[in-house]
Amino acid sequence: MFNSTRISFYLFLLLYPVFTFSQSDKIYEVLTEPFVVRPLLLHKGHLQIHGGYRFMIANKEYDQTGQKNDLADMGTTSFSNDFRFRLTYGIIEYIQFSATMDYINTITTEPDLVIGNAGNIGNISEYDQIKGMSDLGLQLSIRVPPVIKKFDLSFSGGLSLPTGKYKLDKPTHYIDPPDPLGGSFNAIYKYHTNPGNGTLICSAGSSLQYSTSKLAIILNGWYHFKTNVIESISWNHRLNSGSFMYTEVPYHYKLGASADFSGFGAWQIFPWLATYGQFGYVISSGGWTEITGEKIAIPKSSLGLFSVGYEIQVSTHVRFEQFVNIPVFGKENIAELSFYTVLSYNLIPLKGLYY
């Protein structure tokens, strides 16, 4: 009884749009605007609270020639459960501000390595977990007042502040049983990586939209560049009486520049339901690392993705969205199949000021 009452209460909070507040027709129109006729930026006074979940599985990779290889055949698996949090606010009709942060949890397992001889077999398993909060992303966008009917144009600038941890945490390797001299043993290598970049990242982009009452086409382009050489650490280990001893090894690296482009098409099936497809292309180049003791260039990489999804206007305030990203080609990159679920809550908190 208690659980059903609590669930009903939560649903009421989400779905109560019209009868709690005396909204003007203009506010209702802003919050329920069909997907394909929305401008590129939020309207003035519109606050959007965005929560998203991503499940990712990586079972393929593209080599330097573009050949797709099966990671499972090599004994490697990788999956991720990530959460995205974003606040977006329409400061005035043509200026928008947003802040974004992700919680990332990715686990990669490498193929087991068997060492030793018939009398003393060792099985080495390796795990790498990327876990924690990402850097904080800030973005300011300016929309050009429309001069041609049905067209919309915006320009954006962004900063990714190095707020997340980025240096490797100390590994937590262990031996089972602790004394490998007694016969066969299992060695578990566990690495802990943090998702931060360790440097300020600057971004600039632009979007162009053409829309009708049923159709929207959007072209996007972004360029990202990293500013500093970063000092980080790696860890060497050695086995001493059944326990691992670690030595911290500092090194430097510099991230390269990257660019991404996408073409997006949406179709409004009903006023409350839209479906869409998108093709995106990401390319990165430059950068280097000294993690091996010598300065080595980071290979140029690229990835092409196709996305398909839909959005439902659940109520005046709530929008629900799901989409999938499917890798189609690339070079020097992991082919990640990703599924996204997004829930956004929309409101006009300062109604008297804006409307």
Image (cartoon, rainbow, N blue to C red):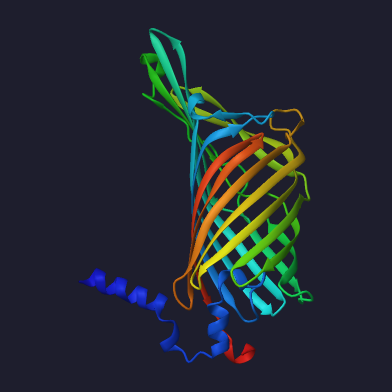
User: 159 or 96, which lies in front?
Assistant: 96
Residue at 54% in and 62% down: 85
Q: Quadrant of the N terminus?
A: bottom left
**Residue 250 percent across, percent down from the top left:** 69, 36
In this picture, residue 98 sits left or right of residue 147 = left
Q: Is residue 313 above or below residue 304?
A: below
Residue at 57% in and 28% down: 69
Q: Quadrant of the C terminus?
A: bottom right
Numbered label tally: 0
Residue at 66% in and 72% down: 39
> Residue 209 falls in which quadrant of the image?
bottom right
Instruction: Decide if residue 85 is in sight here.
Output: yes
**Residue 112 percent across, percent down from the top left:** 46, 23
**Residue 199 percent across, percent down from the top left:** 72, 51
Instruction: Decide if residue 197 is in sight here.
Output: no
Q: Is residue 186 above or below residue 271?
A: above
**Residue 196 percent across, percent down from the top left:** 62, 50
User: 17 or 85, which lies in front?
Assistant: 17
Spot the residue most to the left: 1
In this picture, residue 8 sits left or right of residue 94 = left
> Residue 29 falls in which quadrant of the image?
bottom right
